[in-house]
Image (cartoon, helix red, strand yellow):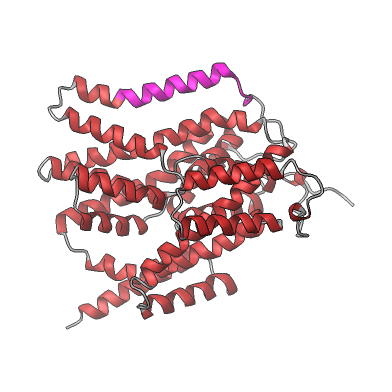
Amino acid sequence: MSMPETPAHPSFREAFAFWLKLGFISFGGPAGQISIMHAYLVEKKKWISDSRFLHALNYCMLLPGPEAQQLATYCGWLLHGKRGGVIAGLLFILPSVFMLWGLSLIYVTYGDTPLVASMFAFLKPAVVAVILVALIKIGKKSLTTPIHYIIAAIAFILIYFLKTPFPFIILGAMVIGLILSRLKNNTLTTEFKHEQPSDETSFVINQNTIAKGKAFQWKSFLLNLFIFALLWIVPLAILYISGNSAFSFWEKLSVFFTKAAFVTFGGAYAVLPYVAQVSVETFGWLSEFEMIDGLALGETTPGPLIMVLSFVGFMAGYHTFDGSLSMATLGLTLTTYYTFLPSFFFILAGAPFIERTQTNTYLKSVLGYITSAVAGVILNLGLIFGQSVLMPAPMEFLWVPLIWFILSMIALQYFKINMITWIGISLGIGIIKFILQAQP
């Protein structure tokens, strides 16, 4: 029996085209975005094997910041080195940056956005369905033993009912993983029988691939650290040298969103309460209602939901400078820059070290337990989002969103309708609803 033929290594141009496309279709939150990357990179193109993809995902799950964007950066780095990682990471967020900027301009210029509100009526329940369907797929791959399910359940209980901080849950899963990974012949750690992945040799990047020129070196790590510090300082230095009279505002904004980037464990919903509390109550950059509207606008764009922070920066500049759209745009730009800059450092500086652990079965086992805990946390995020969309008050169901959520689950899970197609259908139904309501 002949071995499957290894596909040719993708050209930089071919990979660029995919990362650009991904930036425009990455709806559905991290679970949906990761699912899209897996379907294309692993299943369709066979550029990266399942083992290497999940190894990168495990690492990104440990980091603060948007894990899907970091995973795209990691995969781009695997395929084409640093330039591949930078391009993949940038293209993942740039389309959503421009879209959110445009929506923000409309928001402050026209105030009321009834069309967007009408579209939300069907978009939100569809996105809830997308997240749950993608979570089912990821759960099948990461929850492979009874103990994995137990850890996921405990993590869900801790964060949903006991409001345990996400870092403590991850630390607990790590300790459990360190202990259980040392045990031998433990019946709980025996893997269920499941379909084995395709032969590794059928993938361009597989567990036997040596990442040439990507070995970890302290000299390279320190250079990356220096570049990160330089890139952090340069925008503020330019504002200071230019004699900007509101430099203290820009400094406060830059430091705040850098801090937010370093505590974004567990995705956007873990950091949004912190950002809302400080930006609304402490700094007074925007009102509570504007913060909610920003979250709604962010959900209509592709890319990571953490992009909502860019809207906060936009409104901070808008209100601080008396409705100046140029200062609002600068606020959005700096917020985006300082929110995502740490993510690039984590991957480009840390990926070479993580690659050294590719064959370390002990570490892979520990990371597996951590991923199980993250699965429980993602379920919590999905339920919180679903509750706000379908049941905003106890025992008060919104029947139109609920019906559309059920139809979305049927369409995506059983009829396998393309996710992007269904998102488009949901937006279209919302537009039709708006037009019909506008009729005299």
Task: Give the magenta part as a residue range.
Answer: 214-234
On screen, 421 above or below 47? below
Residue at the far right: name it.
1
Residue at 46% x, 57% y: name it: 162
Q: Is residue 49 rendered to the left or right of residue 167? A: right
Q: Nearer the viewer, residue 370 or 236?
A: 370
* x and y, in percent, of residue 53 in the image: 63, 45
Q: Residue furthest front?
A: 162
Rendered view: 292 above or below 91: below
| Membership of 233 in magenta stretch | yes
Could one spot residue 32 in this view of the protein? no
Total label count?
0
**Residue at the location (65% across, 47% down)?**
368
Give the quarter of the figure containing the C terminus. Answer: bottom left
The residue closer to the viewer here, 392 or 109, is 392
Q: Would residue 146 appear left or right of 432 to someone viewing this image?
A: right
- x and y, in percent, of residue 148 in the image: 66, 54
Image coordinates for residue 331, horizontal then vertical, percent = 24, 39
In the image, 18 versus 140, the foreground residue is 140
Q: Residue furthest left?
A: 322
Tell me what residue is drawn at x 72 percent, y 35 percent: 360
